[in-house]
Image: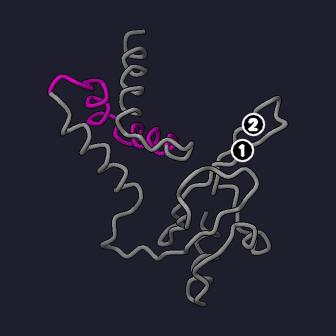
């Protein structure tokens, strides 16, 4: 990951701001961190779910946010994250907190408990959901609430 940050820093300082993941391979960049994959039909078909990834002070942000690609490599912008900019983690945590705080009293009590006791775990699950193409916060919170209740009652 540290090597990836050095590569992005070099590209950013030389003015290269838009890039495709395949262009990073010759630079010894581990571009496998940019996607998750899911195989179907006994592994014959593999779908790639491309995501935004932060490496130190640099963010590789997808140019096109809609849909998933199977074989197409999306374009990315290399962005330098300034100290006062919110990181992707902070933005995602803000989304979770805003939704749960603004929900009715008594609703999503298990998720609220996890937000207080295990915020990093809840955030990681939410980010994994986003990388799999799920952007609906309400739907994800409802599903997570049911799953966490089941785990707590087991």
Q: In the picture provided, is 105 more to the left or to the right than 68?
A: left
Q: Is residue 70 above or below residue 20?
A: above
Between the residue at mark 1 and the residue at mark 2, the CA separation in whole angstroms equals 6 Å
Q: How is the image coloured?
A: one colour
Q: Quadrant of the C terminus?
A: top left
The boundaries of the magenta stretch are: 105-129
The residue shown at (62%, 82%) is 11
Give the residue number, with chain letter if any, for mark 1.
47
Give the residue number, with chain letter if any, for mark 2.
39
Was residue 109 drawn as part of the magenta stretch in this picture?
yes
Residue contact at pointers 1 and 2, CB within 8 angstroms: yes
Residue with the most extreme left position: 105
Residue 3 in which image quadrant: bottom right
- Where residue 62 appears, as percent x and y from the top left, is 56, 64
Q: In the picture provided, is 146 more to the left or to the right than 110?
A: right
Magenta-highlighted stretch: main secondary structure? helix
In the rendering, which numbered label is found on residue 151? none
- Where residue 107 appears, as percent x and y from the top left, is 22, 24
Q: Is residue 48 above or below residue 142?
A: below
Q: Quadrant of the N terminus?
A: bottom right
- Where residue 118 appears, as percent x and y from the top left, is 35, 35
Residue with the most extreme bottom position: 14
Residue 138 in which image quadrant: top left
């Amino acid at each position: 990951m540290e090597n990836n940050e050095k590569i992005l820093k070099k590209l950013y300082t030389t003015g290269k701001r838009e890039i495709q993941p395949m262009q990073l391979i010759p630079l010894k960049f581990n571009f496998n961190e940019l996607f998750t994959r899911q195989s179907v039909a006994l592994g014959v078909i593999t779908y790639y779910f491309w995501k935004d990834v932060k490496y130190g002070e640099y963010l590789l942000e997808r140019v096109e946010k809609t849909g998933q690609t199977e074989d197409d490599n999306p374009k990315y912008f290399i962005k330098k994250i300034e100290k006062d900019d919110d990181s992707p983690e902070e933005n995602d945590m803000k989304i979770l907190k805003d939704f749960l705080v603004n929900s009715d009293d008594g609703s999503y009590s298990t998720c609220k408990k996890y937000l207080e006791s295990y915020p990093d775990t809840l955030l990681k699950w939410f980010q994994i959901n986003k990388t799999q193409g799920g952007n609906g916060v309400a739907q994800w919170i409802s599903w997570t609430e049911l799953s966490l209740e089941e785990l707590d009652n087991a």
